[in-house]
Image: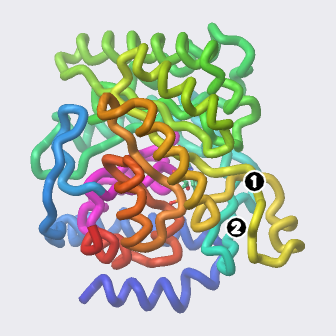
Amino acid sequence: MPLRVYDKVFENVLVRMDAERAHHLTYDALRAGGPALRRIAPPETDPVELMGLRFPNRLGLAPGFDKTAQVWDRMGAFGFGHVEIGTVTALAQPGNPTPRLFRLPEDRAIVNRMGFNNDGAEAVARRLAKRRDRRGSRESVVLGVNIGKSKVVPDDDQTAVEADYETSASLLAPYADYLVVNVSSPNTPGLRNLQAVEKLAPLLAHVRRSADAATDRTGRDRVPLLVKIAPDLADEDVSAVADMALDLGLAGIIATNTTISRDGLRSDHAKVEACGAGGLSGAPLRERSTEVVRLLRERVGDRLTLIGVGGIGTPQDARERLAAGADLVQVYSGLIYGGPSWPRQVLKGL
Ligand SMILES: Cc1cc2nc3c(=O)[nH]c(=O)nc-3n(C[C@H](O)[C@H](O)[C@H](O)COP(=O)(O)O)c2cc1C
């Protein structure tokens, strides 16, 4: 019963620690435990075909957990059918000063301002090249690669922004089952301005061309391209992104990233204030994320794949997200509060 043992460690040790330290401990344990974890059989589930890929099930691990692609291929043991790594930026960067990750247990929520700490696209590509010589392997977890803007690149210099995303797309598309352009993290100044369709459309077209050139060069299949959006967009902006995604022939949309809103929290106001700026994830995000998925589905019909993420904490939440129109769901904060056997419970509920 190794998962039960992990649960006890989680309940008694990890939740009492500084949140980022607990993450590093867990991450290091996953790295060290690779061979053992790969031997744990993934749960029996019904596969689903989307975007030309075969997903073992509808549950995925959202980006932010495996920013540097060192543990994604062992997360199938916990029940995940797909893992989205990243966000990866063209340039390696340390992210924001610590502390930058906080739990709000009364709300089953997390506040983070990590700021895309990662090793950079080149190092991540090298790591993926070693671990993966072909895409879409039938047995394995589906690998999504989420790319974002390097902090030093000014968001109002469209040429520089496109060149920066191009570097990541060119290096990483050959190893990704699907590629995601992230323009929705609140922790890179100016990043979310790129969600305006007049900036986003040329950026996505540029990433599409860069990814195609890279996969052509390496003799790989064309990689499905998606965009990840914020829950704080107004409804009309969500619709505008949906129309643009259809115009550009994107494969899908991921909704949503974290919110900058602090409305309706149960946690003590001073505690919330003490966290400072950052993106809020977990239960308080559930309603808006569901609403955004519903809006998107109404707008795009069955023409795009939608991945629903934000505030999924129970099997019921996951079912509701699928009922609202998501093809796949992803989780992050729920895993932090639920522990390692929680994803399998969610899966059973699906
Ligand atoms: C610590 C942390 C780091 C995250 N880092 C990223 C990231 O690098 N890129 C990204 O697209 N989303 C990132 N996210 C957002 C998640 O992928 C997800 O969209 C969000 O947390 C909502 O899902 P949840 O309520 O299940 O956590 C991060 C979330 C957390 C909690």
Q: Is 53 or 96 nearer to us in this picture?
A: 53
Task: Give me the C-alpha separation between circle 1 and circle 2.
Answer: 15 Å
> Residue 158: where, in percent of width, then height?
65, 11
To which quarter of the image does residue 122 belong?
Answer: top left
Q: Amino acid under label 1?
A: Ser
> Residue 27: where, in percent of width, then height?
45, 64
The residue identified by callout 2 is 102
> Residue 321: where, in percent of width, then height?
41, 57
Q: Secondary structure at mark 1?
A: loop
Display colour scheme: rainbow
The residue at 31%/14% (across/down) is 212
Labelled disc at residue 261? 1
Does residue 94 appear anywhere in the picture? no
Q: Amino acid under label 2?
A: Phe
The residue at 35%/33% (across/down) is 301
Please state the extent of the stretch shown in magenta in the rendering. Answer: 59-87
Q: Residues within 10 Å of mark 1 (few under 14, many from 20)?
A: some
